[in-house]
Structures are given as structure tokens and as C-alpha cells.
Image (spheres, coloured by chain):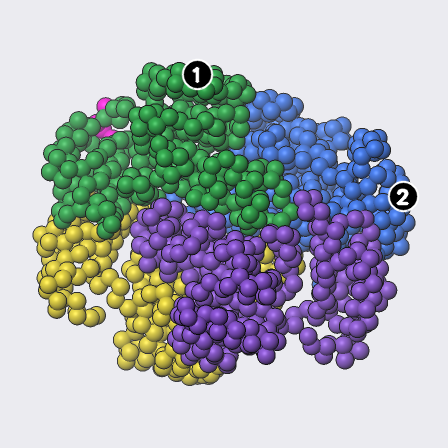
Chain colours: A purple, B green, C blue, D yellow
Amino acid sequence: MSDAASQHADEPTHWVLTLSCPDRPGIVRAVAGVLADHGGNITESQQFGDPLSGLFFMRVQVSAYAPREVLAGAMSTVARTFAMTWSLDVVGRPVRTLVMGSTAAHCLNDLAFRQRSEKLPVDLVAVVSNHTSLAPLAEFYDIPFHHVPVTSATKAQAEARLLELVEELDVELVVLARYMQILSDDLCRRLAGRVINIHHSFLPSFKGARPYAQAHDRGVKLIGATAHYVTGDLDEGPIIEQDVERVDHTRSVDDLVALGQDVERRALARAVRWHAEHRVLLDGHRTIVFR
Amino acid sequence: MSDAASQHADEPTHWVLTLSCPDRPGIVRAVAGVLADHGGNITESQQFGDPLSGLFFMRVQVSAYAPREVLAGAMSTVARTFAMTWSLDVVGRPVRTLVMGSTAAHCLNDLAFRQRSEKLPVDLVAVVSNHTSLAPLAEFYDIPFHHVPVTSATKAQAEARLLELVEELDVELVVLARYMQILSDDLCRRLAGRVINIHHSFLPSFKGARPYAQAHDRGVKLIGATAHYVTGDLDEGPIIEQDVERVDHTRSVDDLVALGQDVERRALARAVRWHAEHRVLLDGHRTIVFR
Amino acid sequence: MSDAASQHADEPTHWVLTLSCPDRPGIVRAVAGVLADHGGNITESQQFGDPLSGLFFMRVQVSAYAPREVLAGAMSTVARTFAMTWSLDVVGRPVRTLVMGSTAAHCLNDLAFRQRSEKLPVDLVAVVSNHTSLAPLAEFYDIPFHHVPVTSATKAQAEARLLELVEELDVELVVLARYMQILSDDLCRRLAGRVINIHHSFLPSFKGARPYAQAHDRGVKLIGATAHYVTGDLDEGPIIEQDVERVDHTRSVDDLVALGQDVERRALARAVRWHAEHRVLLDGHRTIVFR
Amino acid sequence: MSDAASQHADEPTHWVLTLSCPDRPGIVRAVAGVLADHGGNITESQQFGDPLSGLFFMRVQVSAYAPREVLAGAMSTVARTFAMTWSLDVVGRPVRTLVMGSTAAHCLNDLAFRQRSEKLPVDLVAVVSNHTSLAPLAEFYDIPFHHVPVTSATKAQAEARLLELVEELDVELVVLARYMQILSDDLCRRLAGRVINIHHSFLPSFKGARPYAQAHDRGVKLIGATAHYVTGDLDEGPIIEQDVERVDHTRSVDDLVALGQDVERRALARAVRWHAEHRVLLDGHRTIVFR
């Protein structure tokens, strides 16, 4: 992570701190104390205690002059006391992101455009695809394109290549942008909490293959999409965002597919933004989203 | 059905004609011909040919002086030629409706209020419930209340009583407004196409019992409701309308239940309105909704 | 305000604390410190610093055994230091609410129903109307009805009667539920921040009279409603909530009025809920809504 | 317009016929008669009579073997009888479209992407801009780019160049995709009904300049966008489509601008699609949209 911000001691850095820990009194005081001790000014914060899981969640944006090592050091002490999982980052720092796709371009096009024009805080460091049709789009947006073909025989090899890229490129987030392959359990575990998938249905409706055909056959009046973290349990990972679009009887399966692209890219873009802004925290198999 | 309208020969009646039949050239000409031959002026119409089922659907609102028997007679001839299923009604005529409920009042309250204040074209001729808690609300809206208790031993008897009421009161539409009992296959068949249920989930997600608890556990970001015709195949009947509401991690199961009431009554009210306005036509296990 | 909660020392009370003050470092630490010193456990909190107004806003839900006077006393000290505007209440305590209406019943019906069935935390202590048609509905929900006719000659007298009721009944919130009279500047000032109005348009579109007729003439594709605090500046008070509904060319002005009722009551119910849950804080002529 | 379709006499062509005329009995019969006489099979149709304007509107999709000249000839006769404004086109034929932009790329990017991937039935024949920053995007999508600078001194000249391009390129539709210049009255008249603009507010709210800054200052809870036909009366042209997006107090003006881009491109894309599919008919200063 870039520490560039801490060099300019004459202007405060805008930090985002997230944490979760077993709930008990005194957490907010302890954290607010650390921040205030370092001259921090809280500009935005949200806290939530989940009565079911017994966990407490917090996200703070704080403006402070203290350099990272000082802030992080002080937080470490508090974190140990409360058994916290925590992270500290600079607000708006682009998250190093690798996009995996197949042939459908809408999600990649949307993320790349929003990165450039709508301040989506990601740095698209690679596009990986088992086809080549996304190469020109990646090139237009100056994103290195990696063609990694996948067959049942070469699947392990392809996943090894992906992990290599993740390591080499210091990738923090992998986005499955309508990548039509199922990741192995092992890969899911190794990248746990760092892979976002967009599923082309309103989960848990229409799991599995060809959801729009299923939706058309069932005669639904709304179609949807679901952005979720990927786990070994297919289509069952923690949901980050869902959205829907109204349809009617005049729509064919092909129309649903086309209309669905819009819902998919919208839900995915929000999920990626919230993840990159450290607004999504894991609470067991569900998510806390501090929007 | 009231023919009152046909008495005032000095003002045209506003008719609504719906039909479906195997698709083939000439249907619209034939129907428009019948209407024009009787001085009819079409004010609103929609047509749709379903390439999958091979059926053609039509809904026409037409202003005409001809009395019902004349119009209907002329239509009969055309209907035979094209093997049509059809209906002719006066626009806005209230549909005789029986509401079945249990203890939750929101759907009944909503339908009764909209009937009175928002021109929902239904005539609420009875409330039937296996509990008594809806009686005061029914009384406030001057709807006769029938307490029909149901136990596993008396289920057949209770259904017989319902059928009796349907017959006696000339009921055209039965609305299951969060009636928590499952109707028998036999009853479903006898009232086919005349019973609308509101299911408290975004079908086909969370079929069966306690959908909000299921939704909460899955961590969904939208909850929904589905209004559908009842068939013997539980929760699988043709969908008329669906709607959703955004939720987040702060919501408990109880909150979802309370929030869900709003989605349920909204989806149900639209489905009932469209049915009563003859905007819903059956196309196999799906619906055509001419909104 | 009821202090009943503080009697049961064996179970913690769930408090909601809101505050706003000039932004500067240390606010959250100071508040969290007070709460922790009294054994408080924060279950939900949100903070926001507005860079434009320079104000800081906070809402905390905290579970604590300390009685009100102790908590409030400790907060007073902090509040003086930071020049805070603040309030402390028991979570879920019903806010004493007076509803003003005219002839349209949909908003009153909706609020009364939600109060009873959806845990809307208000206590409806009076319905005041310049007509009598809402009396039966008020009676059904056991709300005392006050007929206060208004003519241009008796307007001052009618407002005096309203203020009397507000005082006598210890009213905390006045809801203008499609009350068609304009309040005097003086009354607006005296009840500042305590009167919520529902305007039947998506403000600032279609201010003034007959907004649905204006909307129809302009051919808009969405109609809306706006719930806002009432100020002397007609239709310009701080907006709390807005919502819209899709319409099309087939809709007459009357249809828009009927459809609009649904949007109005939805937006109003949310605004009233958020106000009653102390989620709405004033930031000049705008609102902070901690949903 | 291409008549390619009529060459393949062995497969029927799918036609779309639209018309409007003074309302009177017999219109549908006459049109359906012409279509049936030529073996036409209606697959989808909508009709509407506007009681205010006294006009009747119709859109028909019909499958027929008859070549254009035969169908059009027969329609001409009917059209004269009923004083119709009408058009006949092949379903899905791409409409020759010129996009005007300034520096913001989101609308152009969206239209170009949808044209390629979502079957948006337009042929983007030119991008015209008073800046050069859209040139690479146009090039990526193989759309000829024309740089036409505009100053107050050269405005007439720039408009003349635009008209030249419209003529040369046989342009049917001009889309102002956040083109920040106001067209002259004369140009508006010459291209009446053929220019669609996207206005970055929920009209009639926030007309004129910097609508997001106005919206932010007013503290609205929803921001919107409006796609409308351009007339000489700025921001007052017939509305085709509107959409909104929820915002809250944490959003700065810059955030609203970024969020607004999403609403703008969505509303514009729908308006362009409906126009290109001949679903939008003019009814005075309002539109009929047969979706």
C-alpha cells in the first residue's frame, strides 16, 4: 500500500479504518481515543453490533497528520485488547484489481469506464480471459490483457497462472466479470474475501446455469443480479449487492439477457466500489455494508 | 354481471373485451370489424402474439351504443371462427370479491381502503377468516365477516363453506390476503384463474414457510413479494406481479416482516386491480399483463 | 418523556442519543467516553461532518444501566464543552403526534395502520381537521378527533386552538397529512422542526396548487411526493424524504391523483418514522438522515 | 430506408407501422383490413385515444410477405381517408444517428456499447463535438469523428456544418449526449422531432445551468435525468423518459455529478431505443410511448 500520503506533513491524510471484533463495552471509546490522541478528526463513521453473531463492526474516516506507522502502531495495541480484525488505508487509494472475463464485455466495459470517469477507486492491473475477444477493449483502456485458456485438462494450470499473476501484480481484488468458469475450492480458499462474482440472477432464485431462460420460463416480472463474494459453495457466497429490473410478457429470453446486462453491471459496479472503499465487512456468511 | 349500462341508449357504454386464441392472420381485422359494425370507437387496445405458445392475446376498450346482447352475439360468431376464449364487460364494473385472511390485517386494510378511495374496481362482498381478529376492520368497511375455523379435521368442511359462499354471493374473485392455509387441489381446480394469492417472497426464492427468516439468514439485500394465481402446485402458479424493497444488515427478521408488509400489499393491490380491469390473461403457466 | 425504563435497574435501557455541534477533533472520543464511563454498549452509530456547514452530526444507540439523570448530567458537561445541540431518548418510545388533515384520508389511514401494525413509534394523540369526514376513521383507531373549521376570518383563532392542543396534549410532532391550509409564519416559527408536511409533488417541481394537473400537462413520466419540515417559506422547508412512481400517457389527472396517494403516504410514513426514531438532524436548510 | 427485406419473398418481413390521426370510429378496422388483405399477421400492437387532444395513436408490428411499395401504397389510401401522419419501417432496422457531445464521455460510451452489445437499433454515423477529447472513443467504436468548434462568432457556421452532415449522411436522429451548447430556434424547427437531448435533472426541477449544484443546495433525496425532444423552448420539449437515483447527505456536488451520469445514460439509452423502435409518438407537447 502506498504511503505517499504520509510524506506531506503539512496537509492531513484522510484515512479509512475498518474493524470487527467480539462486541463488548468500550470499543468506540478506545478507537476514538487512539484517533483523538493523534489529532484525528472523524469526518464520517458507522458502527453496528450484530446481536446474532455477537460481533461489532466499525468504519471510520478520519483526517490526521500522523503517519501510517504511528497510527497503525497505536491501533495494534487496541486491536490486541479487543481481538480485532482491522485495516487502515488512505481514503480513495485505488485498489489493485484483476478482472476475469469470458466473451461478454459489458461488465469490463463498465468498470473500466467508471474507473476513468466516475472515480471508481480501482487500479485495473490486468484482464484475464479464456477467450481473446476482450483484448481490444482492454487495450483501449490500457489494461494488460492475459489470455489464459481453460479446458478440463488445463484447469489446474490456468488457476496456477492466475495465482502467479495475483502475486506478481500485487492484486488485492479479483472480479469475476461474467467469467463462466467455476473456481476450484482450493483457489476460493486462498483468495477468500478477495473475489467478487456477479451472478446473473436474483439469488437464491435461479441458481446454476442459464438463469434468464429459467426466469423466462417461470414468467417472473422482475429480473435481477447478485454481486457476492466467492466461496467454495457455488452461488452461496456472502451477498454484497442485488438489483432488479422490471420485465413483461413481450420479452424473449434474448431480451432478458440484454436487459440483464444493465442490472449486472450496475450491481457489480456498486459492489466493487463499496469493497474498494472498505465499506463491506464480513459477518459470517452475510455482509455488513456501511454505505 | 350488471347490464345497467345498456339501458341508457343515449350515452355510449365503455366496454372492455379480452380474448385469446391460436394465432393466425385476420384476428384483429375480424374483431375491429365487429366493433366498427356496431359503431364502436376503440379508446385503448393492446395485442400480443406469443411465439412460444402460438397464442394471440387482445384487450380492447371500446365505446359503443350497442347493448351487450348485440355486441356479444356478434362476437360469438367471430369467437367460434377463431376458437377464442373471450370476455366482455363494462369498464370499471366492480368485480365481486371475497377476501380470505388470517390475523395479519395489512392486505385487507389496503384493499378496502383502495376500494373506497382509489377507485379499485372491486366490490368486497365478504371477508372469510379462520380467526376473528379481522372482524372489526371488516365491520368498519361494511364488509360482512364470516368466521370459518379450520383444523385438519374440519378442512374439507371449511372449504365446502367457502364454495357455498362463492356460489351464494356470486363471487368472481377470491383473494388470499395472507391466508395461511393451503387450499386443496380440488378447490384450486374448481376456482382456477379466480384465486389470487400474495406470497411473502420474491418467488421462486424462499418458497414455503417463514420466507423472511430464510431471507434474513441468506443476507439478501432486497426482499420481495409475489402475487400469483393459485394452482394445485404450491407457490408455482402463474405470476401476476412482483415487487421488492431494499434492506440492509441492520434489519432483524421482525423488521423484514414489517417492511415486507408494504411490498406485499403493494404487489397484491396491483395484481387485484389488473385482474379486475381485465388486464391479465393466462398464457399457460405464465401471464400476459396488458398494463 | 417517560422515564419508566430507568426504573428497571436489572435490565439495561436502550438509549438513542443525537447531537450536532461545530466540527473539531475529539467529539467522538468525548461522547464515547461518557457512554463507556456509564457502562454503555454502543449497538449502532453514525457520524457525519459536513464540510460546507462545518457542523458535526452524531446518532448513537447505546445500551446502559445508568438512569436518565445520570447519563444526561454527564452529557451536559460534554455538550457545553463542544457547544452541542443534543437529545437523549429511549429507543422506540412513541413520539406524541398530532395529525392535521382535510378530507383526503389516505395519509391518516396509513399512519394509523402502521402505528398499530408496523411498529411506527408514534402515539397519535389527536386528529385535527377543518372538515368532519375523517372523524369515523379517527374513531376506528381510537384517536380523539377535533373539528377546527378555518375561514380567512377565523384563521388566527384556529391556529390558536391548534397551539392550545399542542400544549395540552404535550404534542412533540405535528404531521400535515394533506392539510390544505397554509400555516402562518408565526406558527411555523413556534413549531420549527416539529411540523412535517407531505407535498404532493417531487419538489422543487410543481410547487403551489394542483401539482398533479401541472405534472399531467407537462407530460412527466414519473410523479413524486416530498416530505419536508415546514418553514415560513412555503414548499421550501428542509426535505426529509422523496419518492416517485412511474406513470404513462394513458393516465388522466384523476389517475395521477389516485396513484400519487400511494407515493405520498409512503414518503410521509418514512419521514415520520425517521423523525420519531431520531434519525433526522437539521443542517441549515437541509437534513442529515441517518437511516 | 433499406428495402433489402422485401427482396427475400420466401420469408415474411417484420414491419412496424405507426400512425396518429383525429379520433373517430373505424380506424383500427381500416388499418387491420389493409394488413390482413396483404396477408399480414399482427404480432404486437397498441392503440390509444387521447380524450384531451382528440387524437388517436397506433403502433403495429406485423409480419407480411408484401413488399414495401404494395403495403405503403395501400396504407396511403387509408391514411388520406383518416388524415393520418404515419410511417412504415422494418422492425430492427438501425436508425442513422448522429451523436453530439462536448467533453463528457459517458453517454456516447453507453450508446456505442449498447449499439454493439445490446442490440440498440441505431447506426452511429458520426460524432460531432466542439472539443476533441471524444475522438479516441469514437475511433475505438469506428465512428467518424467531426470536430466542429463553436464560439459565439461561429455558432451559425457550426450549425450550418451540422445540417450539412445531417444531409450528407442521411441522418434520421440527432442525439445531444451532454452537448453543452444551445441550438438556435431555426435549427430546432428544421430538425423538429428528430433531436433528443438528455437534461441532467428531473425536469421541470432545476432547469438551466448547474442542476446538480442546485439539487445539492436544495438538499433533495433523489436526483434525476430527463430525455426529451428538443424544441426552441429550452428544457421544455416533450419528455420521453425520466429516471431517478437515491442520494443522501454524504454526497458532495461532485458525487452527484458522478452518480448522475448513471441516471443520464440510462434515461437517454431508453429514449433512444424507444425512438429507434418507433415507440414514441408526439401528442402536442407530450409524448405517447408504446413500450
For residue C73, the mark is 2
Image quadrant containing the N terminus of chain A: bottom right
Q: Residue furthest front?
A: A153
Residue A269, percent across and down? 53, 64
Image quadrant containing the C terminus of chain A: bottom right
- Horizontal placement of A34 versus D41: left or right? right
Nearer to the camera, A155 or B224? A155
Number of other residues with Cα within 10 Å of mark 1, as a class: few under 14, some 14 to 19, many 20 or more: few
Residue at x 80% of width, y 37% of height: C12
Above or below, C53 against A49 in this view is below
- Indicate the chain on which mark 2 is placed: C
- Indicate the chain on which mark 1 is placed: B
Residue D95, percent across and down? 29, 68
Which residue type carries mark 2?
A: Gly
Is residue A114 visible in the rendered structure shown here? Answer: yes
Callout 2 secondary element = helix
Dots 2 and 1 on the same chain: no
Magenta: main secondary structure: loop
Above or below, C10 against B134 in this view is below
For residue B233, the mark is none
Q: Can residue A286 be found in the magenta stretch?
A: no
Callout 1 secondary element = loop
Distance between the alpha carbons at the discs numbered 2 and 1 = 63 Å
Q: What residue is shown with label 1? A: B154
Residue at x 72% of width, y 29% of height: C165
Above or below, C27 against B262 in this view is below
- Horizontal placement of C211 versus D167: left or right? right
Residue at x 47% of width, y 25% of height: B101
Q: What stretch is highlighted in magenta?
A: B7-11
Which residue type carries mark 1?
A: Thr
